[in-house]
Image (cartoon, grey):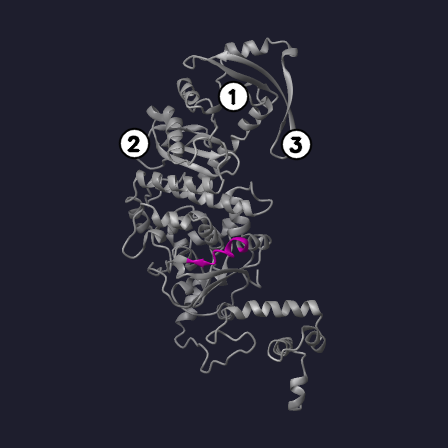
Amino acid sequence: MNPELYFFNLENQTKKQYEALRAFFYEKLPANVCAKKFGYKLNAFYSLARDFRKQIKTWSPQNEDPFFVSKKPGRKFKDETGRLEEKIISLRKQYLSVPDIKTILDSQNIKVSQRYISLTVTKAGFARLPRRGKTVRKEIDNNAKQKIKAPKSEKLPDEEADFVSGNAGILALLPFLCEYGIDEIIKKSEYPGTKSIDKTQSILSFLALKLSNVRRYIADDLWCMDRGLGLFAGLTTLPKTAWFSSYSHRVTREMNKSFLQQLHKLWQKYDFLSDTVNLDFTTIPYWGDDSQFENNWSGTRHKALPGMLALLAQDSETGIIDYGNTDIKHKNKNEAVLEFLDFYRENSNSKDNLRYLVFDSKFTIYKNLKRLDDKEILFITIQRRGKNIVDKLNSLPKSDWKKIRVDCANGKKRTLKIYEEKVILSDYGKPIRRIAITGNGKVKPALLITNDFNLSTEKIVRKYSRRWIVEKGISEQLDFYHLNRVSSSMVIKVDFDFTMSILAHNLYRIVAQKLEGFSHQTDRTLYEKFFCNSAMIEIKEKEINVRLKKKRNLPLLLSATNSVSEKNKNIPWLYNRKLLIEAATVS
């Protein structure tokens, strides 16, 4: 080709874009002239110029040129000794995929591309791995024969790096930590730090495990080499199991309570707390030997088990868990409702925020209902159905029963029959409102009692029915946050573990408010649909690029993250680098 013709040939799109942008920005030609000259529609050219302006804002001469690739002289990497090839083949024999092998090699600071690993595996005669389900992948991870030495956990060095992470999805939660000031609460908390890992990094290490659905802390070979989890906490990798155990034993109940108090003020500041709180107990079973714990009823296993009785207080509207306490004994369980009320009012800007407490029949005694009434707190609970009460209700004529329509969670309505009256309970000493309900799927009528005589019957029934949300949240805590696995050989203090579970749960609830159509999904669903994802991570001088692999719900997550990260791109514990969450070009 004639040298002159080379510069007129614009079939190469990159060259065409360069010439068009040069004419517009450097030669100062009008946009319509440039668009016509280089074959663009005017709107398309405006988009091209806009994207270039955005790209060039963060560019510096030290970075890769957006149009011209610099040649890097020297020989390409070659495995002269054959040790790397042996390592790759050894890992493939454990049924590990190319991205898994890449993650392990990155953790050992061995720089090699996925393409090189793929070519090595193909050359050795290995076939492509079939698509594997979650259960199969976990079995592979657990049955990996070769124990690979994990790198030492230390503060993330202030230098550039790039690697692949299998648990990078939770990095999209970092802007939310900064947006709502949760990182500042952690920084100012009473929790301890260590010489090598400060307070913020310590708490974020626990939080990373909670958010990423690590079911057993003792299985540290599954997560302590993932640099993406380490990056979440500002570390090279997360610490090993011994560190987590020793750290938790330095934490006291007073530290956890103070932390929850500060979070309580934060939830109030952002209007995450309504006027109604659902209260319930849950049992965290203990599976070890020589148990000194009291026997408590476990609803998920339908029997009494030795374990810890824990109290949860959950907002009925947002699902935020405002309070938790694992130091509940049989002798003081009836007073737990008053302890929560003291906690709430000590840390509230206004005592009028809380109006309703909703709980079941075994949560407290009638004497404490009178105390709640004296403190101007409205309550809704269930009265136990004695034989005389049931016989009386069964003998009532049909005309005494009234039909009502109650809204259900799915937007539909349900017809119930109710009978309302005023009764006097022992140890309560004054009339109380009782509503008998049939048509709710139970053989015997349900008996709601409340000291609210003004709210309509339909709203009373609806408000109590929402209490089932807290029970759903509790079962989810036990399942997703592995609170029923206290027998792990790495012992974590339960109250601290419980507090970290509450923080992780609330963070998911906050993000769910930004995900249209997913605000009422469980934490497990949110994790599997949005945050269970791998990524290619590139740490640059002033920014961190996280390119998440393509996923069906990824655009919605990027939209929610970008809406928050516009003001909170700089992450303090990552040397104030900008965090850019993007979609990769691969799935």
Quick check: can you spot residue 219? no
Quadrant of residue 23 within the rendered picture: bottom right
Amino acid type for the residue under numbered disc 1:
Asp
Q: Is residue 289 toward the left or the right of residue 233 in the image? A: left
Q: Which mark is residue 452?
A: 1
Circle 3: is it few (<14), some (14-19), or many (20+) Cα within 10 Å? few
Magenta span contains residue 396: no
Label located before the other in sequence (3 or 1): 3
Label located before the other in sequence (1 or 2): 2
Q: Are marks 2 and 3 in contact (CB under 8 Å)?
A: no
Q: Which mark is residue 412?
A: 3
| Residue positioned 50% across, 38% down in the render | 319
What residue is pinned by disc 2? 292
Magenta span contains residue 564: yes
Q: Is residue 189 above or below residue 24?
A: above
Q: Quadrant location of the N terminus?
A: bottom right
Of circles 3 and 1, the one toward us is 1
Amino acid type for the residue under numbered disc 3:
Lys
Q: Are marks 1 and 2 in contact (CB under 8 Å)?
A: no
Circle 2: is it few (<14), some (14-19), or many (20+) Cα within 10 Å? few
Quick check: can you spot residue 41? yes
x then y, percent, for residue 396: 60, 9
